[in-house]
Image (tube, rainbow, N blue to C red):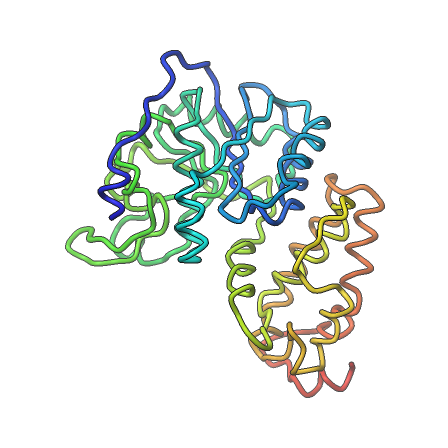
């Protein structure tokens, strides 16, 4: 079906504007991510950036575009344009509820909307710390004359085992529009395929990378200039589909609530439990969201280190930093000293 429906691209613009466009793939029912992305990226050096394309997913709700129009007034680095999925794509994704199809449709619409030779995929749960990060990222891609310039190695270790250690993750990926269009749209979709005689499940854009000469893909020797929490939206989609108690083992639901409280004063009604409700999950196994499993304790230190880096960064004013610090404090009291030998019974005794 995908091969039939997504075998060709819509024609690109006749004359491109030199530079790059930023594509923000945003959840349409979680506008706080849009607010964060606009605020974070507004601190960037705008050199080479032509426009910002916001592509909400199939969960797009009434009022999102109005918030975009309002918040874009404080976004000085480029014009902002919203591009939506087709009605058929929205209906399809709402029926199948596959977050990976959802994201792929956003990617396709973003690529087709490009008016520049280069594009950057901005991940909404990534916070850019360095003001010249995007400028340097684009310039490195152009200077090296590569088709893709990533910021991280691909997360799936299977590729390295197959000798494909040059692949890059999609977050903050800078790529040539012509490279993306050299593959059929369906090929960018996460799907099962075969590479070097091995069958594997390929995440979005990774199968085309496997077909690309290694010298056309690059990334820095080390990660720098950003904080990335990873997989936050997809975790929320799984939470939405779940019933009963949901173990927030990587603290992503908690992160979302903290960020909503810090960033969004729009009055938007979110389905994410309040901070008070989440705190109950520290001891109540019947709570909608819980924090009771051993694996959860083992993940806290990494999550908390990232959160503290954000709190201490130049991105947050005093009010936002205080909201995050005060909101996380009850969890700090429970999880302080968390390590692989940390006992759940010891934690519960502190609640």
Q: Where is residue 266 in the image (x, y as percent from the top left)?
A: 76, 44
- In the visual, does 86 lie left or right of 341? left
Is residue 287 visible from the viewing direction of this image?
Answer: yes
- 99 left or right of 189? right
Position of residue 131 measured from the top left corner of the image (x, y, whole percent):
65, 30
Image-quadrant location for residue 28: top right
Q: In this view, does 222 lie above or below 100?
A: above
Q: Quadrant of residue 272?
A: bottom right
Determine whether 60 is above or below 42 in the image: below
Image side of residue 94 versus residue 133, left or right: left
**Going 33% across and 46% down the picture, which residue do you hit?**
189
Q: What residue is drawn where x is 78% and y is 68%?
A: 276
Q: Which residue is drawn at 68% across and 27% down?
A: 75
Q: In which quarter of the image is the C terminus?
A: bottom right
When the figure is inspected, residue 299 is found, relative to residue 21, above or below; the finding is: below
Q: Position of residue 96 (x, y in %)?
A: 40, 57
């Amino acid at each position: 079906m995908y091969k039939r429906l997504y075998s060709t691209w819509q024609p690109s613009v006749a004359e491109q504007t030199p530079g790059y466009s930023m594509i923000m793939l945003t959840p349409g029912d979680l506008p706080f991510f849009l607010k964060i992305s606009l605020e974070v990226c507004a601190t960037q050096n705008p050199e080479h950036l032509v426009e910002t394309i916001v592509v909400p997913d199939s969960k797009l709700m009434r009022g999102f575009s109005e918030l975009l129009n309002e918040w874009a007034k404080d976004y000085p680095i480029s014009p902002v344009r919203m591009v939506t999925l087709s009605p058929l794509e929205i209906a399809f994704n709402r029926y199948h509820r596959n977050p990976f199809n959802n994201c792929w449709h956003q990617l396709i619409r973003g690529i087709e909307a490009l008016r520049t030779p280069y594009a950057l995929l901005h991940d909404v749960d990534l916070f850019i710390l360095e003001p010249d990060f995007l400028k340097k990222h684009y310039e490195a891609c152009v200077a090296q004359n590569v088709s893709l310039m990533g910021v991280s190695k691909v997360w799936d270790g299977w590729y390295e085992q197959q000798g494909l250690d040059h692949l890059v993750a999609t977050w903050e990926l800078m790529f040539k529009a012509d490279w993306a269009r050299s593959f059929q749209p369906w090929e960018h979709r996460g799907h099962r395929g075969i590479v070097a005689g091995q069958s594997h499940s390929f995440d979005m854009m990774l199968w085309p990378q496997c077909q690309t000469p290694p010298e056309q893909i690059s990334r820095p020797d080390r990660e720098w200039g950003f904080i990335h929490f990873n997989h936050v939206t997809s975790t929320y989609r799984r939470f939405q589909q779940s019933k009963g108690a949901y173990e927030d083992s990587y603290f992503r639901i908690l992160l979302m609530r903290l960020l909503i409280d810090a960033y969004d004063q729009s009055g938007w009604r979110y389905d994410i439990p309040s901070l008070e409700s989440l705190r109950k999950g520290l001891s109540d196994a019947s709570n909608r969201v819980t924090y009771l499993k051993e694996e959860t304790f083992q993940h806290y230190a990494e999550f908390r280190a990232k959160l503290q880096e954000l709190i201490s960064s130049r991105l947050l004013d005093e009010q936002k930093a205080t909201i995050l610090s005060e909101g996380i404090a009850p969890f700090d009291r429970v999880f302080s000293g968390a390590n692989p030998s940390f006992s759940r019974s010891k934690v519960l005794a502190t609640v």
